[in-house]
Amino acid sequence: MTKTTTSGKANNKATTKAATKAKPELAPFEYPVAYCIAGVDEVGRGPLVGDVVTAAVILDPDHPIEGLMDSKKLSEKKRELLAEQIKQHAIAWSVGRASPEEIDTLNILHATMLAMQRAVQGLNVVPDHVLVDGNRTPKFVSPNGGDIASQPVVKGDARVAEISAASILAKVARDHEMIALDQEYPDYGFAQHKGYPTKAHLEIIQELGVLDCYRRSFKPVAAILNSGSR
């Protein structure tokens, strides 16, 4: 089941140099020669619960955004502020997801690649080059069936503004989902641990049981299920 959230400006401004207009926080990166570049990043590979969330962003060189960096290095308040600026000023942005069921079926790596493809497919402007955080990239296909060039960038969320922006949108989107889960299941503490396998979280699962939103293929969850716990 495809899951995407998308918005943006439907225009085709060049974005090759979008990151060069006031991004002192980012380590140097030599951009590929391309007219329209999208950055892609993921959040949520490690948690035991919920979707793995990805985002794709095409920045507008005429509206540079100050303060873009790896989302993990930003406060929650700063991430929220930057996320709103990204949505307002980016040429296009999209959020893609893969569900716990897809993670259990495909494994977390392939589910993440699928979510990245969904994020790029959700853009209302088709990029001609995609920069992906990490050391691998899925295959991206344009609406007309042609391949979209892509390139993995190690530590890209600290080097490429488009990837930094994507990491912020993905992080904010997933945190909001954990807060919503916390409201639905207040005893599980999702707003605090965000689904990660902390000691307190594991103790809660052991006591209260495994919900449908958990990734049953992940070892801590599988161990609890196999032990006959609730």
Image (spheres, rainbow, N blue to C red):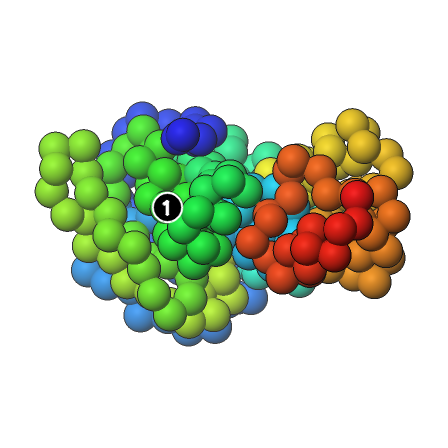
Q: Residue farthest to the front?
A: 228
Q: Nearer the viewer, residue 44 or 172?
A: 44
* Placement of 29 over or under 170, stated as above or below: below
Query: Could you tell me which residue is drawn at 68 percent across and 55 percent down?
Result: 226
Image quadrant containing the N terminus: top left
Badge 1 element: helix
Q: What kind of residue is marked 1?
A: Leu
Query: Could you tell me which residue is drawn at 37 percent across and 58 percent down?
Result: 132
Answer with the quarter of the image where residue 138 lies.
bottom left
Q: Nearer the viewer, residue 101 or 137?
A: 101
Query: Is residue 221 shown left or right of residue 30?
Result: right
Category of crowding for the residue at label 1, using alpha-carbon neighbours closer than 10 angstroms: few (below 14), some (14–19), many (at least 20)? many
Could you say where residue 169 lies in the image, as x and y percent from the top left? Answer: 55, 43
Q: How many marks?
A: 1
| Residue 119 can be seen, yes or no | yes
Could you say where residue 49 lies in the image, as x and y percent from the top left? Answer: 65, 46
Query: Is residue 198 shown left or right of residue 46?
Result: right
Image quadrant containing the C terminus: top right
Could you say where residue 84 lies in the image, as x and y percent from the top left? Answer: 59, 35
**Disc 1: which residue:** 114
Answer with the quarter of the image where residue 172 lies.
top right
Q: Nearer the viewer, residue 163 or 198?
A: 198
* Placement of 108 over or under 27, stated as above or below: above
Query: Could you tell me which residue is drawn at 45 percent across and 42 percent down?
Result: 102
Q: Nearer the viewer, residue 230 or 186?
A: 230
Could you say where residue 145 lies in the image, as x and y percent from the top left? Answer: 12, 37
